[in-house]
Image (cartoon, rainbow, N blue to C red):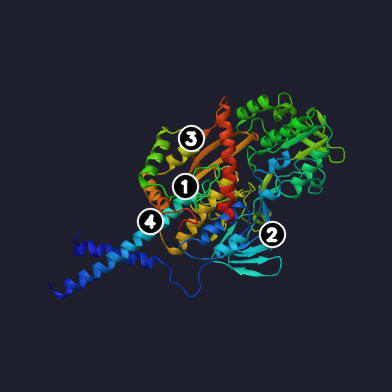
Amino acid sequence: MTWTRRKFGRVAGASLAALAARPARSASPPRVVVIGGGIAGATVAKYLATSSAKPEVTLVEPKQRYKTCFFSNFYLAGTRSLESLTHGYEKLAGNYGIQVIHDAATSIDPVAKTVVLAGGGKLSYDRAVVAPGIAFKYGAIEGYDEAATQIIPHAWNAGPQTQLLRKQLESMDDGGLFVIVAPPDPFRCPPGPYERASLVAYYFKQFKPRSKIIILDAKDTFFEQDLFEDGWNRHYPGMIEWLPAQFTGGVKSVDVKTRAIKTGGDTFNASVANIIPAQIAGELAQRVGLADQTGWCPIDPMTFESRLHPAIHVIGDATNAGDMPKSAFVANSQAKACAFAIASALNGSEETMPHLFNTCFTYFAPNDAVTDAINMKPSNGSIKITDIFFSQVGESDEIRREASRQGEGWYAAFTHDVFG
Amino acid sequence: MTVSSLTALALAAVFFTVNADAAAAAGQERGAQLAAMCASCHRLDGRDQGIPSIIGMEKQTFIDAMAAFKSGARSNSMMHAVALQLSDAEIATLAAYLGARVKEGKR
């Protein structure tokens, strides 16, 4: 290769410009504080720690161990232990040098760029990432408040709530009625309530075959409805009944003691009930003003930086991210895009277009699963779906068995990706 | 050749090296960022269960597989979607990055 002066000048100039764009390195590396150790928070911490920006990463999470919501319907079905859904933070700390603080963040000062912890500590940051998950909108159903969850669980965060629901299903008599109240959009895990009905039906079919499941929905349609209805007909004929809001008038109130659930028309007397309330962004997002009037957090679609507070990024279920569904896979996908955007900002290098993707393995029975695959892209200030593919009704048993096997492999690979 | 042109040549050599290293590092980082998308389903240490391992493949085998997923010649909706997201240049970057990885314990 011959180098002319002109080429040399251009290359040298470009290199010098790149060097100049890089912020002067002081003795201490940039600091990123990640609040929330769910799927989004754990993923962003890991990918920041391995990025070329080499920031000092602190992860703030009150719980010692995290239990995944995804696959927790298998725990309700009795085919998977809660332990198998439980993940610690030791590898993030040990292998990636992330400082893990088991405490709750109580406030953030976006001007001073500090985070205050419940234990009294204070952390300074150059960038903060907030991944607070969801909170429940109690009050939409009369009689269902936080105290009521100790009798009628929501089981929409995995842990004690899921255990309570499993216990109630185990002690239910054969011939009982299990009622699931499904939430309005948008909510965490669009196929979740219907997969729950499927896998509880799998349990009933073996041990309590005269039992029934009714889903009282706040909506008139639901995700992958044709696939679910086909799956229910094949595996559990007559056991699951789905009632849309237009049919019942919606759930109005509940008598927690008697488990009587009153709709616009009929009242349903449940043996076991599971009320999944309407949702908004997690509590910290509300408290520090990261959520808007929708209840969710508006973000820049390229970087996931809050539109309300600069230098704070929001990822995961708490975001209003256009067409992106609220799933663990999306949380992981957003977290990577966010980590790379923060690394670019800290390095002073060019932003790249994020690759945003979602897939879900959804089970009708342990050997019958379907998948969806969704491509999304920043577009006009929001995030839009560019391609979407679903499994089809009428696929062979072999295809479904293969998907169920892949789903198991996905769980192992995905949790390894998130927790190290 | 004048002193100044020699200096320019020497400087050019320095910058060429710096830029080649920078380009390699940038390629490596871009590869790692693209592979992060794969890591949501495929373990990058070769210890997959139920999901095919994608590390240590011949570059062309990887490129051909992605082309087949993109065209639909190989039927898999998840990989079809992933392949549609990736440009030819990105697939080549991934082929190099993933191809260079070896199963843990074999290093």
Q: How would you rate the neighbour count of disc 4 (Cα within 10 Å): few for under 14, some for 14-19, many for 20 or more?
A: some
Amino acid at the residue labelled 3: Asn
Q: CA distance from mark 3 to mark 2?
A: 38 Å
Which amino acid does the dot numbered 2 rest on?
Gln
Q: Chain of mark 3?
A: B
**Label number found at residue A64:** 2
Residue at horizontal 43 percent and vertical 54 percent from the top: B101
Quick one: label 1, few (<14), some, or many (20+) residues within 10 Å?
Answer: many
- Which one is in front, A392 or A268? A392
Left or right for A54, reference A235 = left
- Residue behind mark 3: B76
Q: Are marks 2 and 4 on the same chain?
A: no
Q: CA distance from mark 2 to mark 1?
A: 31 Å
Residue A305 on image: x %, y %? 53, 55
Q: Quadrant of residue A323?
A: top right
Q: Which residue is mark 4?
A: B27
Q: Earlier in the sequence, mark 4 or mark 3?
A: 4
Helix, strand or loop at mark 1: loop
Chain ID at mark 1: A
**Do residues under tags 1 and 3 come within 8 Å of each other at their CB atoms?**
no
Q: Is residue B106 visible?
A: yes
Give coordinates of residue A158: x percent, y percent: 70, 48
Compare residues A232 and A21 and report the one nearer the observer: A232
Element at badge 2?
loop
- Would you identify the image quadrant in which residue A287 lies? bottom right
